[in-house]
Image (cartoon, coloured by chain):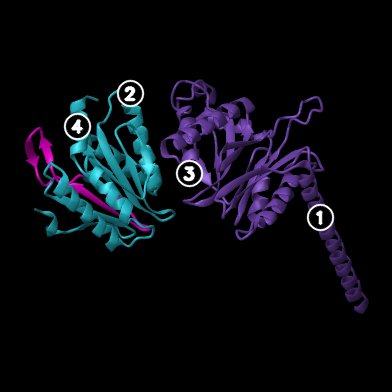
Chain colours: A purple, B cyan
Amino acid sequence: MAKLYDGRTTIFSPEGRLYQVEYAMQAIENAGTCLGVLAQDGIVLAAEKRNTNKLLDEVAHSEKIYRLNETTACSVAGITSDANVLTNYLREAAQRYVLTYQEPMPVEQLVCSLCDLKQLYTQRGGKRPFGVSLLYMGWDKHYGFQLYQSDPSGNYGGWKATCIGNNHSAAVSMLKQDYKEECDLNEALALAVKVMSKTLDATKMAPDRVEISTLTREKEKDKVKIRVLSEAEVKHLIGEYEKQQEKEKKEKEKERERKEREKKAAQAKK
Amino acid sequence: VTRRTLEKLVMECLLGIAGRDFVVFASDCTAAHSIIVVKDNKNKMVRLDDRLVLLISGEPGDTTSFGEFIQKNVQLYKIRNGYSLSPHAAASFTRQNLAKALREGPYTVDMLIGGYDEHDGASLYYLDYLGTMAKVPYTAHGYASYMTLSIMDKNYKEGLSETEAVDMIRMCIAEVQKRLIINLPKFNIHVVDREGVRTIDDEKMET
């Protein structure tokens, strides 16, 4: 039944669905994971790197994190070529705004403008939607630090912590449990590493498999800093996480042994 | 832009003085067509927002249509986004439109934009028909500037009080009425601050 209404994006199915949009979202289900965490003093974006082929020449600065303007950056999940077109559009939109208003584009307005474009491709022209979901992190004077997510339908939402791409539902449920609103940037980084390691394909997380970036603000200078962590820093974070894991494992062991002893003692009494 | 239209710009008087958290504006009330005074109580002030004001002078049709265009766009931005444009952003937007139109169908208007902003305090911007924009502590448009800028240069102090600013504006108006050959009997004085926009009623101004 679905096949009859698949042909063009401009058409609803009898059940009121847009299949092309849903298929686009399906394309992202298998893409590299991206997650974002909002802290009191900054935002963390972590992305899984898929191009780990040794023959690949090193990318200039970043593979999955794109700087959009002075105060906003984004990460993408989905078809890379589509993503390049969209980030180009975002950068142009941001500059058009600053040309007219002589101040940086507020984050939500930037996200909105791209979502309006994405929506267009679900309604007009007979063209397919963009197979990209994006996570945006930014700061503006109206709402401070913000984290947004947008998908191929052109829908967007503001988040405290979220995940897109491969294994995103598992990641989101982890974030729901462990995320604390009053966390600072370091706690957010630790949480990102923890969730990332659980969602990655390989059993062990390594610095060349993941890209982490942060957005912070120096209040006195009124300057926003967007930084991609170096390999050494990522290695350190992973190390910290593994130490924490070891600690928790040992504590669990101790607890288990204690319970065993108690059980035995109870039995002996009988 | 012909010489005739440029002449219209200089006949009118716009004044502005900015303190730390207020801006005082004055504009004359005369609308003239050649040698005839068509209207003697014209308000040349456009309220762009609760704490943002535009003073506009020049070619009669342009003043109304461009003034309204800016006002409606400022309001549209506010409704779309849930927050207002800052004075700097609004002035930049205005300048952008003037600059675009300059090489095709220019608006022959001179303007002052000023207002109060939570983040940056009070600010005053000078704009002219060529797409010039400058942030200034005090300024004037028209022939009146020849007489009033020197008064402001002498008396302006950073952090001056609203009373001092209004007195300075009155001094400027008096000088314009004394020395400028064009008769400008009535002026409107407005103040923009954290509380909003208000008019200063002054019978002294009518001669």
Q: Position of residue B41 (x, y in %)?
A: 11, 47
Q: Residue under circle 3?
A: A106
Query: Dot 3, crowdedness within 10 Å: few (<14), some or many (≥20)?
Result: many
User: In which chain is the residue bearing label 2?
Assistant: B
Q: CA distance from mark 2 to mark 4?
A: 20 Å
- Under circle 2, the secondary element is loop
Q: Amino acid at mark 1?
A: Gln
Task: Indicate which label's residue lies in the foreground, 3 or 4.
Answer: 4
Of discs 2 and 4, which sits in the foreground?
4
Marks 4 and 1 belong to one chain:
no
Residue at horizontal 33 percent and vertical 42 percent from the top:
B126
Q: Say which mark, if any, is on residue B103.
A: 2
Mark pair 2, 1: CA separation: 67 Å
Q: State the CA–CA distance, disc 2 to disc 3.
A: 30 Å
Density class for disc 2 (Cα within 10 Å; few <14, some 14-19, many ≥20) is few
Q: Identify the residue position indicated by label 4 in the image.
A: B7
Look at the numbered disc 3 and give the secondary structure of its residue.
loop
Residue A121 in the image: above or below residue B86 = above
What's the mark number on residue A245? 1
